[in-house]
Image (cartoon, rainbow, N blue to C red):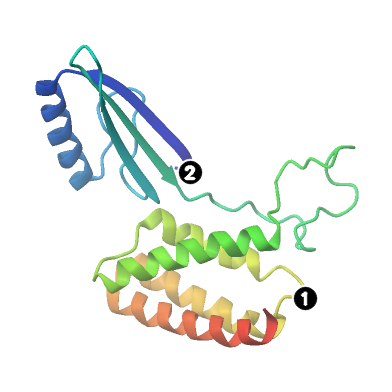
Amino acid sequence: MHGKRRMELSMDRAGLSAWLMNLAESFERGEYLSEEPPVDLEGFRKLKVSLRQNPDGSVQVKLSAKYPRPSGTPQSASGGQPVSGEGDAQGATDTAVPKYTSLKKHMKQTFKSIGHALSAGQLPPSLEARSFIADSRLMIEYQGKGEGYYEAYRNLTDDFEAALSTGSLDGLRSAYQALAQLKRECHSRHA
């Protein structure tokens, strides 16, 4: 899941108490809430619940969840610009290739989130970790952005993915630390 999901409800105070308990139970299971439209509680980047009391005594509940955006598969890695002949006259393409800076910003967010989960002794959310892996594979397709580090980065990304698929917390920590070190080295020369 990616993008943003919202849900708005209105209920009395007793209903609010039951809804909050259901939210807590659903959160533990990572399952969808039963209300329409469903909101997936697994792999979100940001979850926000707001409550507002109405003049009639009812409570307005708003729940919004933001999920990481998966990166598109590159048709061209020339700085995020499509190669000539792709897209229509106004420059739209079927598969959007993100600008390098947008891709790096997204990678920074997901990498930070993965680091927080690992330092808390938890596996990172699968969706975020998979998004980071996909972004990493896309990033090394860009030219002029530190190609000398790409092979080592690809290998470390493969190690990270292997540790993720086996659920090895120690393997993920080790791969994460190696990726962080390589990132520092590359960015000190190419940023």
Q: Quadrant of residue 17?
A: top left
88 in relation to 8, above or below:
below
Task: Tell me the quarter of the image containing the C terminus.
Answer: bottom right
How far across and how far down the image is residue 40, in percent? 34, 39
Indicate the secondary structure of the residue bearing disc 2.
loop
Q: Residue at x 36, y 75 (%)?
A: 172
Dot 2, crowdedness within 10 Å: few (<14), some or many (≥20)?
some
Front-most of 94 and 181?
181
Looking at the image, which residue sits at the far front?
Answer: 55
Q: Mark on residue 144?
A: 1
Q: Residue at x 43, y 73 (%)?
A: 160
Q: Is residue 80 left or right of residue 88?
A: left
Q: Quadrant of residue 148?
A: bottom right
Q: CA distance from mark 1 to mark 2?
A: 30 Å
141 in relation to 68, above or below:
below
How far across and how far down the image is residue 152, in percent? 58, 84
The amino acid on which the numbered mark 2 sits, given as a three-letter code, is His
Front-most of 100 and 153?
100
Q: Is residue 20 left or right of residue 108?
A: left
Mark closer to the chain start, 1 or 2: 2
Q: Is residue 81 left or right of residue 125?
A: right
The amino acid on which the numbered mark 1 sits, given as a three-letter code, is Gly
- Residue carrying label 2: 2
Q: Residue at x 25, y 69 (%)?
A: 120
Front-most of 151 and 30?
30
Task: Tell me the quarter of the image containing the N terminus.
Answer: top left
Q: Residue at x 43, y 57 (%)?
A: 128
146 in relation to 94, above or below:
below
Q: Is residue 157 left or right of residue 74?
A: left
How far across and how far down the image is residue 9, in percent? 29, 21
Q: How many marks?
A: 2
